[in-house]
């Protein structure tokens, strides 16, 4: 694969491109993205990091640039920062050298000009102070001028009034006397107004002088605070660096372990064996959570089949090869099945989202601390899908369960089930809209037997607390069932959504029964800033037949973390606790798995903990997110599956979410009508509930008891695994659909 070439610089523009940077003797040269701008050379691990995480910066004005050979060159500032770099070709290296030399000359020239101007001009603080003082002097001068004018006005006003008094004493006609008295009154008012104006100017000058001193003190205090904060951050970053250096330097790797292929090539004499983070003085603002385990490439002997291998290794390697073959075969079969079975033509677009403004704070300020499901929210916060349809979106990557059903190994099967649990969150990364709260008794079916081999049914079985039951059956050998209740709290800056309930997945062939719970979803920047979604928490996927377990950890986003955003890690262990696979990836992009060949305990871990070091074979991809449809940013960031969920279909139950009038109006951009219709449906639901509760009270007084509500297609019973009360599909929906017999369905719309 050819390397992306650097962006050719225009005069005054930045220069960007990929270079290989020496890190340490284990990793060797690593590919990094370098940016040259304004006399500073910065680098990042990926281009995506440019917006938030700089891995290191060196000032070219004080740097020395030297060439080692045809592709290698070194940049050093004479202190702790030294970059050993390598270009992909001699031509590419020469381009960088030319750009660096030009940038260095410009930086030196700008620094000299800055020094000259610094000698001539006062410091910014002194400049601000002198400017304020000059303004005050000007104000004082103007007030003095006004005072002089006031004295003149008073003097001439008195003379004018005396003259008018003398005129009044003269014998003049009545009309003339009246005119003189009016002029005298106006002169008096003029003098009073002038005095008031002068007094107000004096008060203004006094306040300006008083507050000027306060402003100067506050400004100096903020500057001192900034200096102290910078010093504290620098100390924390150095402590972080030292701790990480001690941890990496003291960790014991198993004997015979080797670094990545090629890491032993191109070793530069005189370079230490510490990581590039130690060499770069890469400072972060806070300590991040230490990883629970460490993975290193396995000994090369595990990649070869030989009779001298440890017992069982050959069979495991054979199984590892089988995984590739099985995955390839499964992909081919799924692709073939999709080609053979003609797909129903489904819509690929919905009307674009209107651009309606909304005062968010005026609505949300009264919601702090309340249960979100009990707050009447306008559709402006929604997306045109119900919670039942969002729950059905878990099946976006149902092919993972299809592949799992074909696995002979329960541990391999567990890897695919774990990837399926992660994949259900990939559709949420840009989905900041709130789904419609389903009405009690609302249902949603998704029949994809002809296309994907499954059919799904959801029903809202409880309204307070809101809970939905979900049942999926597949002709490819698996069944999925879950009951999810949402607990949500608005905390001012963010909204937390905690799904309660257990998801079950059962495979018909092996009878393996898996369960897991969902993690917490957090919506940030509710009041100020751009909304964004994060998933955090831990998931234990348990095989109740074999005792196998996969522990997944969703790392919460941290501004200070150097890890990739939305990271997910996991370990697959058998019933005895022995690790067999390591899972890694992100919940919005992809997941990979690596077979564990050997494990050991590291030493001197962070905070005194001993980390497990796993030697693994090369990673293989389990799952990758599908690209979003074209124009998704104007369609609520819906995936291809989500675009089809609210498409009208014939024969569905009259309680189906597709038939909700408020949701349909919102999808077509008629939001005012949708809000009115939403209020009507909610009031109708409340009146039905009040009637049901009154009937329950009446029957209780008569000595009998009736349940307030019973689901149509699910029945409440005890979960045989968790022993919790849950709703299980009791059958009958698809038979009723075939007969179009919906007499038992409630009138909710």
Image (spheres, grey):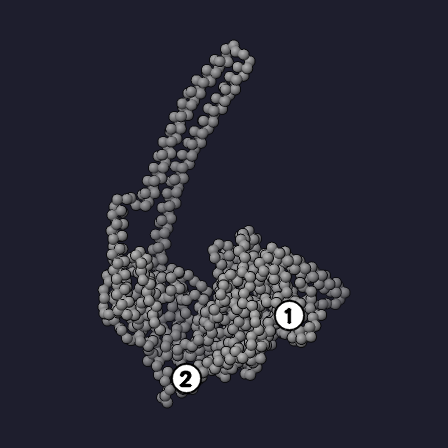
| Mark 2 burial class by Cα count in 10 Å: few <14, some 14-19, many 20+ | some
- x 73%, y 65%: residue: 700
Whether residue 136 appears in this view of the structure is yes
Q: Secondary structure at mark 2?
A: helix
Q: From the image, which quarter does the C terminus lie in?
A: bottom right
Q: Position of residue 252 (x, y in %)?
A: 34, 75
Q: Total of numbered circles in the picture? A: 2
Instruction: Decide if residue 303 is on the left or right side of residue 359.
Output: left
Query: Which residue has dot 1 on it?
Result: 650
Q: Is residue 415 above or below residue 103?
A: below
Q: Earlier in the sequence, mark 2 or mark 1?
A: 2
- x 47%, y 55%: residue: 529
- x 27%, y 61%: residue: 100
Query: Which residue has dot 2 on it?
Result: 317
Q: Position of residue 250 (x, y in %)?
A: 33, 71
Instruction: Decide if residue 674 is on the left or right side of residue 583.
Output: right
Q: Secondary structure at mark 1?
A: loop
Instruction: Decide if residue 689 is on the left or right side of residue 411.
Output: right
């Amino acid at each position: 694969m050819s390397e992306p070439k650097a962006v050719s610089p225009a005069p005054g523009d930045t220069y960007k491109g990929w270079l290989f940077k020496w890190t340490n003797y284990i990793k060797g040269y690593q590919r990094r993205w370098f940016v040259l701008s304004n006399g500073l050379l910065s680098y990042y691990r990926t281009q995506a990091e440019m917006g938030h995480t700089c891995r290191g910066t060196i000032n070219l004005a004080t740097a020395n640039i030297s060439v080692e050979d045809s592709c290698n060159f070194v940049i050093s500032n004479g202190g702790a920062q030294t970059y050993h770099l390598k270009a992909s070709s001699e031509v590419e290296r020469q381009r960088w050298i030319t750009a660096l030399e030009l940038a260095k000359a410009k930086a030196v020239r700008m620094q000299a000009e800055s020094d000259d101007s610094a000698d001539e001009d006062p410091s910014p603080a002194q400049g601000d102070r002198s400017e304020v003082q000059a303004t005050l002097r000007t104000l004082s001068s103007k007030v003095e001028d006004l005072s002089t004018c006031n004295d003149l006005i008073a003097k001439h006003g008195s003379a004018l009034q005396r003259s008018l008094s003398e005129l009044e004493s003269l014998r003049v006609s009545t009309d003339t006397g009246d005119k003189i008295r009016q002029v005298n009154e106006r002169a008096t008012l003029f003098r009073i107004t002038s005095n008031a104006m002068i007094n107000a100017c004096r008060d203004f000058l006094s306040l300006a002088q008083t507050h000027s001193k306060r402003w100067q003190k506050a400004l100096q205090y903020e500057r001192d605070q900034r200096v102290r904060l910078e010093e504290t951050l620098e100390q924390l970053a150095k402590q972080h660096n030292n701790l990480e250096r001690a941890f990496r330097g003291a960790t014991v790797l198993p004997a015979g372990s080797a670094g990545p292929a090629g890491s032993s090539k191109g070793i530069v004499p005189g370079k230490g064996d510490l990581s590039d983070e130690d060499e770069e003085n890469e400072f972060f603002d806070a300590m991040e959570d230490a990883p629970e385990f460490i993975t290193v490439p396995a000994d090369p002997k595990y990649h070869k089949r030989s009779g001298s291998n440890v017992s069982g290794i050959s069979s495991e390697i054979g199984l590892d090869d089988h995984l590739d073959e099985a995955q390839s075969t499964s992909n081919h079969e799924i692709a073939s099945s999709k080609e053979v079975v003609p797909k129903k033509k489904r819509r690929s677009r919905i009307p674009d989202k209107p651009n309606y403004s909304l005062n968010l704070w005026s609505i949300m300020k009264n919601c702090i601390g309340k249960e979100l499901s009990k707050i009447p929210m306008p559709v402006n916060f929604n997306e045109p899908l119900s919670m039942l349809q969002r729950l059905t979106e878990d099946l976006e990557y149902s092919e993972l369960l299809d592949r799992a059903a074909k696995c002979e190994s329960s541990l391999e099967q567990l890897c695919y089930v774990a990837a399926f649990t992660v994949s259900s969150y990939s559709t949420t990364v840009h989905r900041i809209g709130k789904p419609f709260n389903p009405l009690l008794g609302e249902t949603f079916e998704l029949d994809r037997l002809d296309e994907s081999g499954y059919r799904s049914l959801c029903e809202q079985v409880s309204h307070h607390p809101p809970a939905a039951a979900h049942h999926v059956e597949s002709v490819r050998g698996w069944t999925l069932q879950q009951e999810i209740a949402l607990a949500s709290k608005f905390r001012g800056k963010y909204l937390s959504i905690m799904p309660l309930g257990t998801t079950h997945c059962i495979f018909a062939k092996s009878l393996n029964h898996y369960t897991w719970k969902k993690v917490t979803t957090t919506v940030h920047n509710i009041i100020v800033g751009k909304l964004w979604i994060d998933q955090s928490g831990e998931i234990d996927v348990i095989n109740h037949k074999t005792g196998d377990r996969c522990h997944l950890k969703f790392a919460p986003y941290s501004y200070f973390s150097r890890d990739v955003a939305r990271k997910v890690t996991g370990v697959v262990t058998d019933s005895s606790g022995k690790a067999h696979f390591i899972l890694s990836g992100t919940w919005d992009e992809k997941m990979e798995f690596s077979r564990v060949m050997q494990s050991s305990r590291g030493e001197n871990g962070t905070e005194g903990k001993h980390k497990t070091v796993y030697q693994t074979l090369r990673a293989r991809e389990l799952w990758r997110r599908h690209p979003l449809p074209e124009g998704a940013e104007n369609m609520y960031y819906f995936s291809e599956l989500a675009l089809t969920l609210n498409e009208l279909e014939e024969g569905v139950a009259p309680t189906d979410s597709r038939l909700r009038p408020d949701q349909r109006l919102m999808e077509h951009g008629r939001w005012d009508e949708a809000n009115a219709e939403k209020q009507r449906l909610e009031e109708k639901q409340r009146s039905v509930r009040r009637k049901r509760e009154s009937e329950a009270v009446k029957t209780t007084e008569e000595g009998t008891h009736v349940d307030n509500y019973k689901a149509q297609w699910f029945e409440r019973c005890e979960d045989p695994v968790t022993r919790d009360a849950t709703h299980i599909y009791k059958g009958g929906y698809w038979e009723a659909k075939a007969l179009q017999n919906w007499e038992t369905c409630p009138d909710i719309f």
